[in-house]
Amino acid sequence: MAEQHDGPLRLRLRYRFDGLISGGTTALIGWMALACLTVVVPASAVLVWSDRAAPATLAGRLTAVWVSVGQTLKLGGAVGSPLYVLASVALALVALLFVSTLVGLITTGINRRIMELRRGHSIVQEAGHTVVLGWSDQIFPVVSELVAAHANQRRSAVTVLAPKDKVEMEDEISAGVPATGRTKIICRSGATTDPTVLARVSPRTAKSVLVLRPEEDSGDAHVVKTLLALDAALPRPAGAVIVAAVRESAHHRTAVLAAGPGGHVLCVDDIVARVLVQTARQPGLSLVYQELLDFAGDEFYPAAAGRLAGRPFGEALLAYTTSSVVGLLHAGGSVTLNPDPTTPIVSGDRILLVSEDDDTAVQEGAGAWVDEDAIVTARPAAPLAERLLLLGWNRRAPLVVRQLDEFVDAGTTLDVVALADPAADRAAAEAASGLTRLEVAFHQGDITDPEVLDKLDVPSYDAVLVIGEQAPGAAAPEAPPADDRTLVALLHLRAIGESCGRALSVTTEMSDDGNRLLAPAREGADFVVSARLISLLMTQISENACLAAVFAELFRAEGSEIHLRPVTDYVRTDREVAFATLVESARRRRECAIGYRLHAETGTAPGYGLRLNPDKRLPVRFGEHDRVIVLAED
């Protein structure tokens, strides 16, 4: 029976306690005072009566009980006339009220300040820092690259503003970028489209501002609104370098207008499609781009012409021992990649080169290491029609098809295998119209079905492109299931390659860099991870605004681009030669050599045989399957 009444008794007691709490402040103080007296008075009486030194008389013991109660409740416990006792109790109560009120005010103020800090509403007091506006999967490669770029600085800061909880952002960045070195990461919470909120990250004193695109479909519109808010928050001309990215080419012009004359806006779809096409035709090119775009190795830097001013560009190619010259950066901001060797370097021009850092671009001269006897002259390659295979279809696929038509030789064929989807069929028809060099054939099929791939005779194709494709009824094209289907298709392609005993030339598009680590592909395979690629480009431009023109020129179909060509077209392979000999041989072909790739090391980590910007004095014995990396016209 006791157990049966235990539950209802607990509920009744809790109900009465809730009633006491809800009675208001006065009732709560009264009940708390009564509860204290109920405990303190009997306990004080026990202490007095159990004390051997207690007074013998009852009055004396009652006085001692009062003193104990007064000391315990901080009422002083004064003894004397009734008026004196009442006055002392009144003063003690006033003091207690004053102190408790003061403590409450201080506690409330501190708690309010802590909550403001937690909400991330305070204004950042930094100068020369980098501001990142928005939150997406790009935040981690962006912050990581900024940390690497600032590694040689004594003090640097990156501030992030996004409509997320400040502590949550700090925890996620700490988990995604565990080593930040000397770079301080500061997070603030708020809407990036509100000019008054933007003041929290001090964009006026920043050296650069990066605007990240949110993951949702309306992300491009959000980027445009953020750029307009920046225009309202920053004086004109803006002192900070503004870099943003939109997904669709239809929104690119609007974003450029919103960014203003000093802003740089990247179009994700155009750039990713261009890199996919270039990489499919140049196996290993994705590794070169990764080396050039991240801050861990060598990247683009402009350097003063110095004593090269007035000299022809060809002399600059061997003027640096530990840097590779690729072009000229003119005084007006325009860029010429791989100019004619006879082009004069005029006053105001800067030398554009690939170097480990801006302080390693030293003019020492490497002409003494050129071996004239090792240089060979190869005939220009004849046009070659190719057979290409495109597995999957998404919103970027029409761009891939059209840009393939700009790069390939006449007579090249492209077979496209994709799921049956009316929207994709319309896009496919639009993509196939107006092509001049490329012949396209579309086939319905599931790229995750091994029977579909077996019927294609995959080894007969010169190159295979695998792009993210959604299953019917899936959500956005960038959703994780697209990468999941890509991983399954790569697994089948690896099995096909193993069965035929050869490595297939496969270029893969992915949206999540984490999925690339799970990919069942050979070491050093070509992966184009859209989020990471755009993040690397944005951070490079944010650190050096003149590189925006460099990358725009590099990704154009016209002009010069990066190629991996047979080393046998440049030097003899029966002897050791210094890299300076390759540079000189490339110069005579009107090209700029920036590195090489050794075939024997292509399947081994970490460099996969890639050597970018090697010391021109170091000798190398090349094999007939090795490649030289050059900047040249197609």
Image (tube, helix red, strand yellow):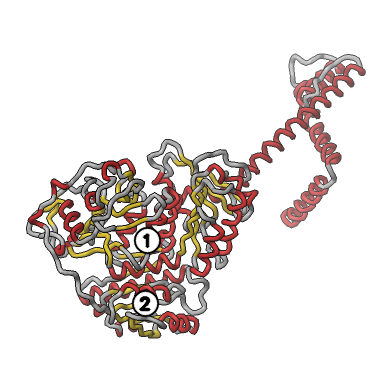
In the displayed structure, does residue 530 sit left or right of residue 204?
Answer: left
Q: Is residue 373 visible?
A: yes
Q: Which kind of residue does numbered mark 1 sit on?
A: Glu
Q: Is 171 on the left-hand or right-hand side of 19?
A: left
**Circle 1 residues within 10 Å: few <14, some 14–19, many ≥20:** some
Q: Nearer the viewer, residue 258 or 461?
A: 258
In the rendered structure, the answer to whether residue 15 lies left or right of residue 586 reads right
Q: At label 2, which amino acid type do we have?
A: Leu
C-alpha distance separating marks 1 and 2: 29 Å
* Residue 267 spot, x, y in % from top left: 46, 64
Relative to 243, does residue 458 appear above or below in the rendering? below
Which sits in the foreground, 382 or 428? 382
Judged from the image, the secondary structure of the residue bearing numbered disc 1 is helix
Q: Earlier in the sequence, mark 1 or mark 2?
A: 2
Residues 8 and 290: in front is 290
Q: Residue at x 32, y 58 (%)?
A: 337
Q: Secondary structure at mark 2?
A: strand
Observer-side mark, 1 or 2, equals: 1
Residue positioned 28% across, 58% down in the render: 338
Residue bearing the label numbered 1: 553
How packed mark 2 is, by other alpha carbons closer than 10 Å (few <14, some 14-19, many 20 or more), is many
* Picture quarter with the C terminus: bottom left
In the rendered image, the vertical position of residue 407 relative to residue 205, given as above or below? below
Residue 104, by quadrant, is top right
Quadrant location, the N terminus? bottom right
Residue 346: image x %, image y %?
A: 32, 49
Q: Give coordinates of residue 613: x percent, y percent.
A: 25, 51
Number of the label disc, if any, that sits on residue 391: 2
